[in-house]
């Protein structure tokens, strides 16, 4: 195969059952059609037959893919994406920042696909072309942070194996005493990167995730559980081969323009998504509070605990960023609290989803015996304790390797069921899970991560937990309280206020994704604009770079692709086609693998009861519900119109033969689509 630029042309296929590693050489025309990352990963799920309903998510036949794209390497804002069949039996596309994507490209790979199942715990060690399947028995059972440290120490590049250019004789005794043990120097700890699962993934908690750098997560849809089902603890990577580019000078010129633009972005560089709280509660009426019973507090003072400036004073340690990124939206923090459980915890200042889903959603931002309807009567020390609970709960999810969006939704559901006396403490193995009780949260999360007692039920997530208790207690009304779409948690953006349109959550290619794109188009019922936004976001995940930086890439992306790859005929409109292909394939994947007969009723209409029937009790959107409380306006009018605009059938939302042909994916998708039209 001719040498490619931007991409390497190689994907590693690791079969853990046979203990073999092979190379998949992806043709250039496939890269041009799917770019890399998420779209290329979905393509391989079809090509390799993982889409078939006979492939159980936790079977050896399922394939978990760690994918990158042509931008990953020396470009800024790099992310990686995991693509697999989720334990929930729908598509899993989950992105994360960090250094691992860069290291994988420098090692000479565009992705790693893992199939099979090892007969004992293993991890993969990738050093350039060499991939080893190594025993992980000594780190199995470790939390994500401890396991990552051990994995990073286990690989060195060839250059790092050489003896120092300094002779021992050149060192004074004082300097010699400080010298690292041979082959255990600073390079071994800093220059490798890893993806790792925690106890949650090992025990196949359905919403377990894959972590890198302690707090960056492939957070959504349970990729960690799929890794755990294969006895795969993680992957550690050290690459030294560089990033081959078609026009390096042009590429670097555009990169400098992006970085210069980012350096002027005051919002992201100041506090990241910690700047969202006050807007969400006080203007948009969309802050998750006590399982979405409220979206705003009567007293705006409550939300101050999770505002960037306050968190900065209370817990900030240092700012950090993904390679080459000038936004610096991760902030390391140390928790301060009067409670020994939380005090001194090293974590990060939570991003918006953590602030909402394991902050306000768990009743952490009210004083004891107060409700969101009451005025705030505390002081700044109370606000510090509010913040500490939020940070510690986010830390626990990272520590165990579990998604805090789904985890927060689950915990909030249980708290509301206790509030309404629909379950008892006895139903939770004696843990009385009440609003704001961090110790009860700590206890129940330990059970979930290890599938102990009731934790074995809760580990299957919010929707399955609600089903379990509805049947066990003979109370079908319990199904009114899980706030999930397509059986997975709604993130920290509601549809009854002024933030999201419900149709966006219903149609996004990954269940309830909050960064699906197209928001303004949905609000204006301009479905062509909404679809263009969704397609653009899918292209971002295929390139693969950070959505938060997308505005700084606007108008430059196609030129950057051309400079990287040498595809002189590549244009901005080609990015949209990549997204359209991904959306069509994801829709077919979810319908086919679940064998849905009537996708609208069996899938699309699986949305929160709260959307239509629980008006907001306070805030600027007081009294509002989604679509005027008329589900038929969403599902019988807006949704078919959206499907039509995509070139899908209006009754079931199946891509037409003409659409698949136009997108150039009929060869892998038409036979499946024809079964469901």
Image (tube, rainbow, N blue to C red):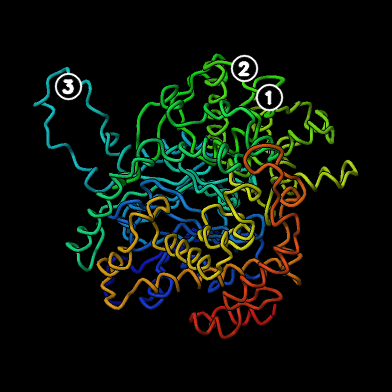
Specify few, some or many for label 1: CA neighbours under 10 Å numbering under 14, 14-19, or 20 or more. some
Question: Image quadrant for the N terminus?
Answer: bottom left
Quarter occupied by residue 383: top right
Tell me the residue that label 3 is attached to: 175
Residue 370 location (% of width, % of height): 70, 22
Instruction: Look at mark 2 in the image and give the residue it sits on.
Output: 377
Q: Is residue 605 above or below residue 444?
A: below
Tell me which label, 3 or 1, sits earlier in the chain: 3
> What is the CA distance from the residue labelled 3 to the residue labelled 1?
61 Å
Q: How many marks?
A: 3
Q: Nearer the viewer, residue 604 or 16?
A: 604
| SS state under label 2 | loop
At numbered mark 1, what does the secondary structure look like: helix, strand or loop?
Answer: loop
Q: Are marks 3 and 2 in contact (CB under 8 Å)?
A: no
Q: Please name the residue that numbered disc 1 is placed on.
A: 374
Q: Are marks 2 and 1 in contact (CB under 8 Å)?
A: yes
**Res. 588 in view:** no
Q: Residue at 44% of width from left, 31% of height from top? A: 308
């Amino acid at each position: 195969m001719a040498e490619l630029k931007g991409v390497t042309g190689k994907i590693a296929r690791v079969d853990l059952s046979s203990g073999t590693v092979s190379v998949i050489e992806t043709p250039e025309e496939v890269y041009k059609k799917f770019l890399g990352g998420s779209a290329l990963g979905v393509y391989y799920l079809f090509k390799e037959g993982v889409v078939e309903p006979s492939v159980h998510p936790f079977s050896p036949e399922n394939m978990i893919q760690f994918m990158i794209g042509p931008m990953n390497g020396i470009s800024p804002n790099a992310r990686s994406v995991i693509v697999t069949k989720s334990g929930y039996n729908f598509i899993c596309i989950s992105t994360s920042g960090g250094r691992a994507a860069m290291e994988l490209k420098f090692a000479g790979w565009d992705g790693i696909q893992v199939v099979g199942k090892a007969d004992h715990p293993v991890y993969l060690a990738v050093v350039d072309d060499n991939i080893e399947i190594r025993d992980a028995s000594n780190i199995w059972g470790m939390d994500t942070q401890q396991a990552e440290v051990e994995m990073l120490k286990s690989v060195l590049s060839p250059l790092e194996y050489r003896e120092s250019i300094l002779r021992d004789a050149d060192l004074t005794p004082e300097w010699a005493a400080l010298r690292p043990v041979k082959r255990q120097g600073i390079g071994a700890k800093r220059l490798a990167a890893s993806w790792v699962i925690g106890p949650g993934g090992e025990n196949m908690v359905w919403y377990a995730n894959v972590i890198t750098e302690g707090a960056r997560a492939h957070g959504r849809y349970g990729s960690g559980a799929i890794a755990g089902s294969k006895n795969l603890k993680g992957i550690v990577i050290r690459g030294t081969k560089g990033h081959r580019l078609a026009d390096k000078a042009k590429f670097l010129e555009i990169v400098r323009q992006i970085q210069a633009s980012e350096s002027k972005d005051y919002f992201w560089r100041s506090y990241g998504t910690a700047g969202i709280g006050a807007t969400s509660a006080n203007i948009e009426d969309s802050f998750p509070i006590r399982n979405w019973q409220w979206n705003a507090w009567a007293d705006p003072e409550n939300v101050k605990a999770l505002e960037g400036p306050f968190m900065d004073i209370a817990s900030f340690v240092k700012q950090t960023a993904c390679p080459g990124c000038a936004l610096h939206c991760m902030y390391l923090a140390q928790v301060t609290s009067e409670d020994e459980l939380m005090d001194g915890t090293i974590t990060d200042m939570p991003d918006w989803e953590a602030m909402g889903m394991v902050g306000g959603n768990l009743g952490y931002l009210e004083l004891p015996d107060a409700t969101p309807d009451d005025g705030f009567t505390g002081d700044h020390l109370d606000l510090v304790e509010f913040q500490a609970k939020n940070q510690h709960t986010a830390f626990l999810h990272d520590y165990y390797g579990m998604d805090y969006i789904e985890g927060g939704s689950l915990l909030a559901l249980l708290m509301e069921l206790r509030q309404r006396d629909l379950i008892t403490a006895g139903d939770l193995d004696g843990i009385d899970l009440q609003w704001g009780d961090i110790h009860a949260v700590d206890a129940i999360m330990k059970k979930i991560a290890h599938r102990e007692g009731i934790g074995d039920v809760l580990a299957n997530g919010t929707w399955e937990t609600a089903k379990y208790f509805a049947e066990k207690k003979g109370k079908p009304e319990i199904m009114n309280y899980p706030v999930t779409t397509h059986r997975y948690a709604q993130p920290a953006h509601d549809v009854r206020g002024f933030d999201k349109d419900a149709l966006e959550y219903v149609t996004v290619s990954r269940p309830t994704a909050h960064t699906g794109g197209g928001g303004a188009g949905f609000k204006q019922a301009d479905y062509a604009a909404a679809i263009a936004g969704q397609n653009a976001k899918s292209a971002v995940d295929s390139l693969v770079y950070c959505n938060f930086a997308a505005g700084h890439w606007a108008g430059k992306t196609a030129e950057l692709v051309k400079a990287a790859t040498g595809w002189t005929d590549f244009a901005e409109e080609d990015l949209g086609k990549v997204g359209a292909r991904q959306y069509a394939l994801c829709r077919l994947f979810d319908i086919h693998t679940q064998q849905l007969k009537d996708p609208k009723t069996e899938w699309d209409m699986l949305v929160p009861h709260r959307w239509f029937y629980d008006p907001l009790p306070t805030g600027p959107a007081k009294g509002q519900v989604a679509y005027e409380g008329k589900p038929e306006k969403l599902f019988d009018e807006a949704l078919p119109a959206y499907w039509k605009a995509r070139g899908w059938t209006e009754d079931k939302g199946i891509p037409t033969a003409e659409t698949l042909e136009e997108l150039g994916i009929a060869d892998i998708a038409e036979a499946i689509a024809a079964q469901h039209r």
